[in-house]
Structures are given as structure tokens and as C-alpha cells.
Image (cartoon, grey):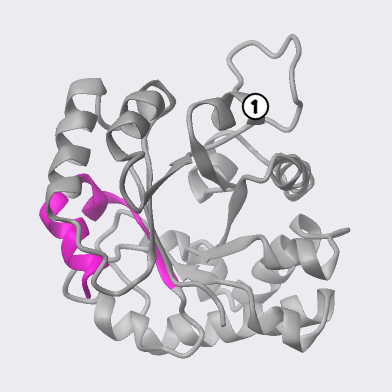
């Protein structure tokens, strides 16, 4: 049975004090009602402080990015061992903002995923189409390339250790959300692609999150879809009450 995982991506928000207030509020009210895995992904500067607040809870720590080299002269980058040393269990790989603003390719992301797995850090691999790609009827073609190129070369067992996050780029931070039917259609398509990289049984065991303006008032309907196994939450994870409402959908 595949895991249900809800992760909060704090992006470039929160200084240390703000992060500690947010996670303290989460910790005080978190009951794990739905028996799911909950992950928070603060900025790098806040990882250790947040970990020290949550290490005695069921809330897990994730990072927003990682370089694929294990160490070296890569000024400004963060290695997997650095993430492990501050308690990270997850890392977001290939968020649309990384693809768009930092020109990260599927090949580069493939290398990052390989390194994350080597260090037993669960990658949350993001895929999704832009508005113009959807309107041109190219959404599935874009996602196919992201899946097949980003996940090439992995065994079935390795694929089961990767979380996929489908994020329609046109729905991130815009207030727009793919309808549950639209999201389910793409999630089912992704699961079919994963089966071609391995087999149907393996594909059925892989967690596929939805990300794109997930909010308390739409999470229940999204999560009711058969191929949606969680959420990658942006803005709504920056307020304890809204993130808790999503966790407790």
C-alpha cells in the first residue's frame, strides 16, 4: 500500500524566528489524525533549528534543493551529507521554479535523484506543464519527457523510493487549481508512464502528490481521487492553521 505524504514547501520565506514560530504552532496542534507522513521544507538557513523543534514528533524534515556532487568546490551549493547532518529525510528535486529560473534540466535532476537515493534521502521529484503547453495540447508530452528523462536508469526498487509531485505550473501561486478530474487524469497518466519504466505493480506502489494551490477548501476532493496520494503545499503551508486543516482534511 502506497504512502500518503503531505509536504509544505516554504520556498524563500521565513527567517529563523519566523520558522520557529510556525513549526512551534504546528507542533502544538498536530495530532496526525489521518496517519499520513507530514514533511516541512524550510529554507536551508532554518533546517537545523526546525529539526531541533520537530525531532521528537512525527513531523519530518525536508530540503528544497540539493546538488548532485557529494562534496567539492561548488560555491553556494548544498550536499546530501549536509542535509543528512541536520536531519533531512526528504528533498524536493526539480520544482518548476528551479526548472524555470535556474534552467535545471531533466538530466541534471536525474543526477540529483541518484545522489539523494544514495544517501537515503527521499526525493520529491516535481513534474508539470506550463499554461501555454496545456493550451497547445502538449501537457502529456512535456510530462512524458520529464518522467522518462528524469527517471531513466533506476531499478524498480529505486523507483518505489521516489515520490512524484505533479504540479501544473499554471496553478502554482496563482490561486488556480486543476480540477480534481484534471488532476486525476494526469496522475493516472504518470502512473502509467511509471509502469513502462518498471512494471504495473511497482507503479501502483509509488506515491504521487498533487501540488498547485492546494488549500483547506479543495484538499478533501483532491485527496479523494484514486491516484492522488498526498500534496506538495506552497503558500498554505506558511500558516499553521491552514496547513493543519490540509493535514487533517
**Quick one: SS at disc 1?**
helix
**Left or right: 9 as drawn, with respect to 194:** left
Name the quadrant of the C terminus.
Answer: bottom left
The residue that label 1 is drawn on is 81
- Residue at screen point 33% across, 29% down: 52
Where does the image place residue 27, in percent across and percent down from the top left? 20, 47
**Left or right: 187 as drawn, with respect to 119:** left
Does residue 49 appear anywhere in the picture? yes
Residue sitting nearer the eye, 240 or 148: 240
The stretch drawn in magenta includes residue 243: yes
Magenta segment, prevailing SS (helix, strand or loop):
helix
Where does the image place residue 55, in percent across and percent down from the top left? 36, 39
For the record, the magenta segment spans 230-249
- Residue at screen point 36% across, 85% down: 180
Residue sitting nearer the eye, 28 or 122: 28
- Residue at screen point 60% across, 51% down: 122
Image quadrant assignment for residue 38? bottom left
Image quadrant assignment for residue 34? bottom left
The stretch drawn in magenta includes residue 140: no
Image quadrant assignment for residue 218? bottom left
Residue 164 against residue 197 in the figure, above or below: above
Where does the image place residue 100, in percent across and percent down from the top left? 55, 43
Does residue 79 appear anywhere in the picture? no
Amino acid at each position: 500500500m502506497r504512502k500518503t505524504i503531505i509536504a509544505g514547501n516554504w520556498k524563500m520565506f521565513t527567517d529563523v524566528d519566523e520558522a520557529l514560530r510556525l513549526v512551534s504552532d504546528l507542533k502544538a496542534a498536530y495530532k496526525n489524525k489521518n496517519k499520513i507522513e507530514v514533511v516541512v521544507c524550510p529554507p536551508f538557513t532554518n533546517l537545523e533549528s526546525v529539526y531541533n523543534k520537530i525531532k521528537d514528533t512525527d513531523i519530518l524534515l525536508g530540503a528544497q534543493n540539493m546538488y548532485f556532487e557529494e562534496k567539492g568546490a561548488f560555491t553556494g551549493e548544498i550536499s546530501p551529507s549536509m542535509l543528512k547532518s541536520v536531519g533531512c529525510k526528504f528533498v524536493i528535486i526539480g520544482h518548476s521554479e528551479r526548472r524555470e529560473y535556474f534552467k535545471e534540466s531533466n538530466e541534471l535532476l536525474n543526477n540529483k535523484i541518484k545522489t539523494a537515493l544514495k544517501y537515503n534521502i527521499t526525493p520529491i521529484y516535481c513534474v508539470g506543464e506550463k499554461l501555454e503547453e496545456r493550451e497547445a495540447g502538449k501537457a502529456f508530452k512535456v510530462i512524458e519527457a520529464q518522467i522518462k528523462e528524469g527517471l531513466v536508469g533506476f531499478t524498480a526498487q529505486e523507483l518505489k523510493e521516489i515520490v512524484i509531485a505533479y504540479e501544473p505550473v499554471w496553478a502554482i501561486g496563482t490561486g488556480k487549481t486543476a480540477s480534481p478530474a484534471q488532476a486525476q487524469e494526469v496522475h493516472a497518466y504518470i502512473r502509467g508512464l511509471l509502469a513502462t519504466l518498471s512494471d504495473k505493480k511497482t507503479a501502483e506502489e509509488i506515491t504521487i502528490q498533487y501540488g498547485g494551490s492546494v488549500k483547506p477548501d479543495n484538499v478533501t476532493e483532491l485527496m479523494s481521487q484514486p491516484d492522488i496520494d498526498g500534496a506538495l503545499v506552497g503558500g498554505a503551508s506558511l500558516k499553521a492553521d491552514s496547513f493543519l486543516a490540509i493535514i487533517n482534511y
